[in-house]
Amino acid sequence: MPGITTAGIFCASSPRIDAEFFKAADELAGILVENDITIYFGGGKYGLMGQIATRVIRDNGKIIGVIPRFMEEENWHHREIKNMIVVNSMHERKETILNHSEALIAFPGGCGTVEELMEAITWKQLGLYTGPIIILNIKGYYDPLLTLLDRMIEESFLREVHRKMWSIVKKPSEVMGAISKSPPWSIKARTFAAVK
């Protein structure tokens, strides 16, 4: 597919995770800045969200935060982000990121991150989102989820063609290549979304 100008990142806010995840977040942020890609992310100041934002700001990159109002009221937002979109709900946050992102990258994360990833895959299955979805499987973190997705296909909850909806990489340096090699997807996917 042609080069992208925007990318959404779903990632964790926990500051207590392994340093390898922080290193990967910092590396990916640098790669996206080098490729002049505007990043849409959850707007937080903690964990991988904070790491990505801080690196992008340091490198004079382009980043836009999307944060629910209640999180801003709790002071969870990254104060150095100049372009912060404040929304009314978690759903609106996710919808805003999806609608503005030509590609999506999912880092390891907790329930929120996994839920965001699965909704993005669901949108793609229905043709509501057609960009690449890149699963950054650092330290094999997503292996159990990938096994479940394989099981969904084996048990005919998804079609074999749906395997093309996501790409799996193990390190940030593979992300841009995975985006460029991502199979094209169409809004017409809704015509075969159901498994009959």
Image: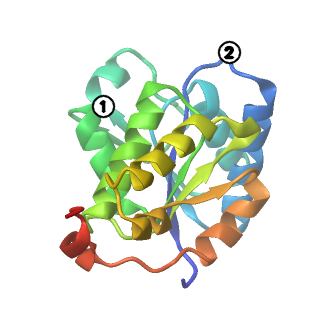
Q: Say whether residue 142 is visible.
A: no
Looking at the rendered image, the quarter that the N terminus falls into is: bottom right
Where is 30 relative to 70, above or below? below
- What's the mark number on residue 158? none
Q: Earlier in the sequence, mark 1 or mark 2?
A: 2
- The residue singled out by tag 2 in the image is 16
**Image quarter for residue 121?**
bottom left
Which three-letter amino acid code belongs to the residue tagged 2? Arg
Element type at mark 2: loop
Which three-letter amino acid code belongs to the residue tagged 1? Pro
- What's the mark number on residue 68? 1
- Alpha-carbon neighbours of circle 1 within 10 Å: few (<14), some, or many (≥20)? many
Percent coordinates x, y for residue 177 in the rendering: 70, 71
The residue shown at (34%, 62%) is 124
Q: Nearer the viewer, residue 79 or 188?
A: 188
Q: Is residue 91 left or right of residue 171?
A: left
- Alpha-carbon neighbours of circle 2 within 10 Å: few (<14), some, or many (≥20)? few
**Image quarter for residue 49?**
top right
Element type at mark 1: strand
Percent coordinates x, y for residue 56 in the rendering: 66, 49
The residue shown at (31%, 53%) is 122
Q: Nearer the viewer, residue 159 or 76?
A: 159
Percent coordinates x, y for residue 10 in the rendering: 50, 43
**Image quarter for residue 123?**
bottom left
Q: Is residue 56 left or right of residue 111?
A: right
Which label lies toward us, 1 or 2? 2
Percent coordinates x, y for residue 47 in the rendering: 62, 26
Looking at the rendered image, the quarter that the C terminus falls into is: bottom left
Q: Nearer the viewer, residue 50 or 128?
A: 128
The residue shown at (73%, 65%) is 34
Question: How far apart, in angstroms, are the residues tagged by discs 1 and 2?
Answer: 23 Å
The residue shown at (64%, 41%) is 52
